[in-house]
């Protein structure tokens, strides 16, 4: 996993989770506390509510993410950029300033005017965006999106999100964003839940990950909370996201989100690195899908993925005959059966456990059902 330098702020595995606070200069934005038209009032908000509360990055939005509203043109965004640039001149605190846009013209004007990075909500649908970011040596958040500047974040299936992030490649300072929520009527809460469940897979690109999950519908739905009461579910999800490999968390609730992110970081699984000429990193891989993403990245055969993860299942209630049948087959399958009379541990890669079902002979209906359950759980 590479470390990205965003105007001196390092983002990566060996760094603390970074908090991205939000400022909007768009009157349409639904979260009114973050919306400002007056630059001096906006600067005061940025200093008091964002930077002083722990924001490392301030993301300035020029238009609303509401999918029911018309998408602004580059010219419309440029008209609003003047307000955003005035805010930069008035802020006294220290933070990295990010411009949220989909247009390379806006990104170029913002970077030239003093912004530090870009948050591209259309994921390089504008093919000139990577060039602009590279010319300014700017970090860029790349949100998964169709190759259409009018439909940001409208990707539903997780595999399609992964593929969308490859659109027009990456810069050396790219930060990937799988785009929770998004501007798509077709995207469901289940889509977002699956994306969150598979968040580790996006580490397969080798670039830092940005997540924007603050008070999202897929979290509120779990607890049955309205937006104004959804902070606790956001904080729980923040810790989980960081533990699963997220490096930047975009939020309106800066102080609380910072604390939750630090807890996730503190208790995340440590990835081993050794000094010397050869670096060693233990990848956080728990499923064949996650392994396949890393294999793709290094140009290896992804068929090896099913042999790249070891799973452990405890089987209780095995009869003597079933235990004997299982013990006779595990060796040929490449799995291991360990345990005594009260229970047994079945250990193996997904591929080995899949082979096991075909190799077990004279299994009872109960054992056959148990092996089918194990096989389904490893997919």
Image (tube, grey):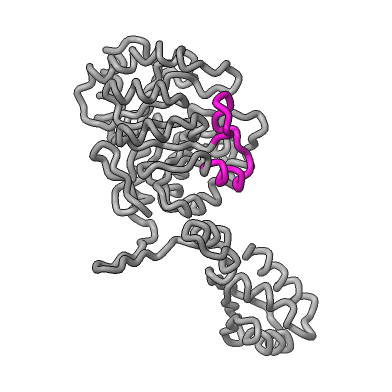
Give left or right: position of 85 versus 74: left
Q: Quadrant of residue 108?
A: top left
Residue farthest along the left direction in this orientation? 92
Residue 215 in view here: no
Q: Can you give x and y, in whole percent of width and height, for residue 209 in the image?
A: 42, 45
| Residue at (47, 42) in percent of width and height | 169
Q: Quadrant of residue 14?
A: bottom left
The answer to whether 157 is drawn above or below residue 373 in the figure is: above
Q: Is residue 38 magenta?
A: no
Depth check, front residue: 348 or 100: 100
| Residue at (34, 29) in percent of width and height | 98
Residues in magenta, as a range: 145-165
The answer to whether 318 is drawn above or below residue 111 in the figure is: below
Q: What type of secondary structure mainly makes up the magenta span?
A: loop
Give left or right: position of 13 versus 323: left
Q: Quadrant of residue 238?
A: top left
Depth check, front residue: 189 or 148: 148
Q: Is residue 150 magenta?
A: yes
Image quadrant occupied by the N terminus: bottom left
Q: Can you give x and y, in whole percent of width and height, for residue 296 in the image?
A: 52, 58
Give left or right: position of 223 versus 267: right
| Residue at (47, 60) in percent of width and height | 298
Depth check, front residue: 211 or 189: 211
| Residue at (48, 34) in percent of width and height | 124
Count every numbered label the image shows and give the total. Answer: 0
Residue 177 in view here: yes
Q: Can you give x and y, in whole percent of width and height, for residue 68 in the image?
A: 60, 19
Q: Can you give x and y, in whole percent of width and height, for residue 126 in the image?
A: 49, 29
Image quadrant occupied by the C terminus: bottom right
């Amino acid at each position: 996993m590479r470390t990205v330098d965003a105007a001196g702020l390092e983002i990566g595995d060996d760094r603390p989770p970074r908090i991205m606070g939000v400022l909007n200069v768009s009157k349409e934005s639904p979260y009114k506390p973050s919306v400002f038209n007056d630059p001096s009032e906006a600067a005061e908000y940025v200093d008091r509510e964002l930077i002083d509360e722990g924001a490392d990055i301030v993301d300035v939005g020029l238009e609303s993410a509401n999918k029911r509203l018309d998408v602004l043109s580059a010219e419309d965004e440029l008209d609003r950029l003047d307000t955003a640039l005035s805010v930069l001149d008035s802020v006294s605190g220290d933070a990295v300033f990010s411009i949220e846009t989909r247009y390379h013209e806006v990104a170029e004007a913002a970077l030239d005017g003093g912004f530090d990075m870009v948050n591209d909500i259309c994921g390089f649908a504008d093919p000139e965006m990577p060039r602009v970011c590279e010319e300014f040596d700017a970090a860029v958040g790349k949100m998964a999106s169709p190759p259409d500047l009018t439909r940001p974040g409208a990707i539903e299936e997780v595999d399609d999100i992964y593929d969308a992030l490859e659109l027009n490649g990456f810069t050396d300072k790219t930060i990937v964003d799988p785009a929770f929520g998004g501007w798509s009527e077709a995207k469901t809460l289940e889509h977002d839940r699956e994306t969150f469940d598979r968040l580790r897979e996006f580490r397969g690109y080798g670039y830092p990950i940005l997540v924007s999950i603050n008070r999202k519908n897929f979290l509120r739905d779990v607890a049955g909370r309205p937006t104004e009461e959804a902070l606790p579910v956001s904080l729980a999800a923040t810790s989980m996201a960081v533990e699963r490999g997220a490096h930047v968390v975009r939020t309106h609730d800066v102080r609380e989100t910072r604390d939750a992110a630090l807890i996730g970081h503190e208790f995340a699984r440590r990835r081993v690195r050794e000094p010397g000429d050869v670096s060693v990193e233990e990848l956080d891989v728990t499923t064949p899908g996650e392994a396949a993403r890393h294999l793709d990245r290094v140009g290896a055969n992804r068929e090896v993925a099913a042999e790249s993860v070891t799973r452990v299942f405890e089987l209780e209630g095995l009869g003597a005959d079933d235990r004997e049948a299982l013990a006779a087959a595990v060796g040929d399958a490449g799995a291991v059966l360990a345990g005594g009379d009260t229970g047994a541990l079945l250990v193996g890669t997904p591929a080995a456990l899949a082979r096991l079902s075909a190799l077990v002979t004279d299994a009872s209906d109960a054992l056959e059902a148990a092996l089918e359950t194990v096989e389904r759980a490893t997919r």
